[in-house]
Amino acid sequence: MSLVTSPEQPVPVRRISQLMAQWIARLGAVWVEGQVTQVTRRPGQRTAFLTLRDPSADISLPVTCSVALLDALPGGLQDGAHVVVHAKPSFYATRGSLSLAADDIRAVGVGELLARLEHLRKVLTAEGLFDVARKRPLPFLPAVVGVVCGRASAAEQDVVQNARRRWPAVRFRIEEVAVQGPTAVTDVSEAVSRLDADAEVDVIVVTRGGGSLEDLLPFSNEALLRVVAACRTPVVSAIGHEADTPLLDLVADVRASTPTDAAKRVVPDVGEETARVTQLRGRTRDAIHAVLAREGAALAATRSRPVLAHPQVMIADRREAVERLVERSRRCLGAALDRAADNLAHTRARVTSLSPAATLERGYAVVQRPDGVVVRRPGDVDQGDALRVRLAEGEIAATVA
């Protein structure tokens, strides 16, 4: 039931603490999975103390159990071990702290770990975190290489020394963190996130040396895998040896078999690149010489043609053709003028023969009234009318009788 409170009727802290203890007590005994840290045994006491931590989050709970329960475990209980605990949660109202009282502790065996990893692999595969399409290519020559590794580890030296041997100018951002134990997942995840946020870092290498399945288990943790999958910077996984295959190898953009192999993948070899540039320059030079030789031969063949060897021949041929055309044009124009003159003469002759003046020359006359109207019939005039008679040469006046 919810409490009824108000500014006038507040609940004291002790009451809230007591209610929390009551509510947590109702939970009863539960099975809890986690990673063991800080196992403490005090001489002469039958109670042992340890901390059970969630490797995927920065959360831990204190656990109390009997010393006999720890002694019953094969090989004892070491820090970093994965266990399943049957315990009853208890809330201490006076201190306001939560703890677990364990009555059974079971170590998680290798077979069970492998089964859980296989189940996680199938889940992440179904989500597409391992798809080849989402993997990003590595830059040809990164300006800065981020390295996540253990403190003063051999894996760090392998990556740094081999990378500088291949490309001496390469720079590094090194994040030394715990790569084994209860804080490994959190430390590595935070280091990867810091490097991914650094704009100068072009590629991130997550590396550590070999180890047992339990030692490499942080690199198969779901929380770390999702952090790597969300990175914008390409990530190279170089965990352990060739036979070691943590799930980080599947979610990373590139998997390197060893830290040394990671150095070979992130930077090119300056000697190989110099030899390749020299080879390409030689091929380019040969190709240019071949083009020049081919074009020179084509130019020489073109210049050897008669039209280019003696260009005046072409001009002479064209001059003769122009002269022939001019002469032909002159003849055609003269013939056209002669025909036109003949046609004009014939036309003049016809016009002359049809002219009224020619008729008058033959002895005919044209009789007109004073107003110029030609008299064609006797009825056109009356007796006494004055007339004009036009002859071939001049005219005479007449009167109708």
Image (spheres, grey):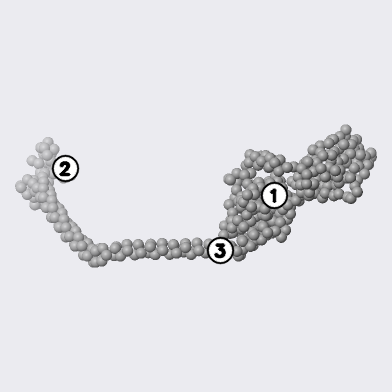
Secondary structure at badge 2 equals loop
- Image quarter where the C terminus lies is top left
Tell me, yes or no, if residue 257 can be seen here.
yes
Q: Which residue is mark 3?
A: 270
x 20%, y 62%: residue: 317
Front-most of residues 143 and 333: 143
How far is mark 1 from mark 2, CA to CA? 146 Å
* Residue neighbourhood size for the residue with mark 1, other residues' Cα within 10 Å, grouped as few (<14), some (14–19), many (≥20): few
In the image, is residue 28 above or below residue 39? above
Between circles 3 and 1, the one closer to the viewer is 1
Residue 194: horizontal and vertical position, in percent? Answer: 70, 54
Residue 150 picture quarter: bottom right
Residue 373's disc number: 2
Mark 1 residue type = Ser
Q: Which residue is mark 1?
A: 212
x 73%, y 52%: residue: 180
Secondary structure at badge 1 equals loop
Would residue 68 be found to the left or right of residue 338 on screen?
right
Residue 258: horizontal and vertical position, in percent? Answer: 62, 54
Mark 2 residue type = Val
